[in-house]
Amino acid sequence: MEALVKRGDMMLTRPDFIEEGTQGHENISNKDVKPPSLRLAQSTSPETKRAMPAKYIEGLREGELFNSLTREIYGEDPIDIIIVNPLGHRNVEFDKDSKVVEFDVPDDDPRCQFTTGKNDEGKTVRIKPKATKFLDYLILVTLKDGRRKLMTLALKSTQLKKGIDLNSIIRSNTLPCYAYSFKTTVSPESFGTKSWYGYTFVPGWPTPEAYAEAKRWYEEMADKNIIRDDIEEEAAEPVPF
């Protein structure tokens, strides 16, 4: 089987002798679906580390977008995102090795609350919650070459405010959530000695074709259980909470 394995394209090419069809799909449930995630590579992302060959994506650099499933690198070019459906939020508790302890910590759990304590100098400081809050979205991504991909997006830490802004735009008018297209770019951010890459979302209107596809996905996925892709590696992002 011939495979196209190059930077920006980790997809397989179908040989001519294999015809299209859905034979053998009959017993695969379509109630639970797991779209790939749109990821933003950080310096701590295992996909950027050659010392972690199981996760490493050759050619991926921090500050670049990529597909968590196909491992396709989208790079730094702007992309257009339509929010097919906001999926709400979740609170995830990680251990010190970024392994998930609990995927859905209740909002009223003490692990979701800020506390106070003493630092090494004896000063009273604010301590972030043990559980990390994620805002989840089902999105339709339009790439630079015009391809459209159904994916998920999770925002946390410094990106939570941007998710709140997205939600506010959607709720500001009596329009479907998929009525807006957000020009999405990546830029470096910092706080003190810490640095990372974050998103910038600029609202606009989708093309008629993208709008129609987003509407179709909204209707098709309305009764589905959207399973978020593995998020353990996202816990290691070196940013303030």
Image (tube, rainbow, N blue to C red):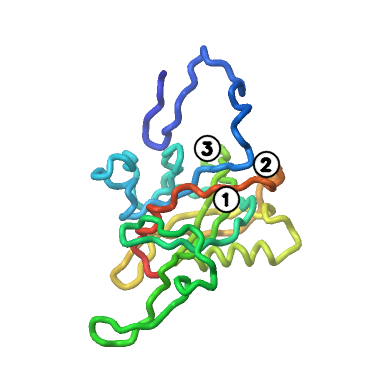
Q: What type is the residue that disc 2 sits on?
A: Glu
Residue 18 or 23: which is nearer the viewer?
A: 23
Is residue 59 visible in this depiction of the protein?
Answer: no
Q: Secondary structure at mark 1?
A: strand
Name which residue lies at 58% across and 48% down. 226
Above or below, comparing residue 36 to residue 89 in the picture:
above
Mark 1 = which residue?
81
Nearer to us of marks 2 and 3 is 2
Name which residue lies at 47% across and 23% down. 13
User: How busy is the neighbourhood of tag 3: few (under 14 within 10 Å), some, or many (20 plus)?
Assistant: few
Q: What type is the residue that disc 3 sits on?
A: Asp
User: How busy is the neighbourhood of tag 1: few (under 14 within 10 Å), some, or many (20 plus)?
Assistant: many
Q: Secondary structure at mark 3?
A: loop
Residue 20 or 119: which is nearer the viewer?
A: 119
Quarter that holds the C terminus: bottom left
Count of numbered circles on the image: 3
Name which residue lies at 45% across and 30% down. 11
Nearer to us of marks 3 and 1 is 1
Above or below, comparing residue 117 to residue 28 in the picture:
below
Q: Position of residue 78 (x, y in %)?
A: 49, 49
Q: Residue furthest top?
A: 17
Q: CA distance from mark 2 to mark 3?
A: 17 Å
Quarter that holds the N terminus: top left
Name which residue lies at 48% across and 54% down. 185
Q: In the figure, is residue 47 to the left or right of 121?
A: right
Above or below, comparing residue 143 to residue 120 in the picture:
above
Residue 11 or 28: which is nearer the viewer?
A: 28
Q: Mark 1 or 2 closer to N-term? A: 1
Q: CA distance from mark 1 to mark 2?
A: 12 Å
Residue 221, located in which quarter of the rendered image?
A: top right
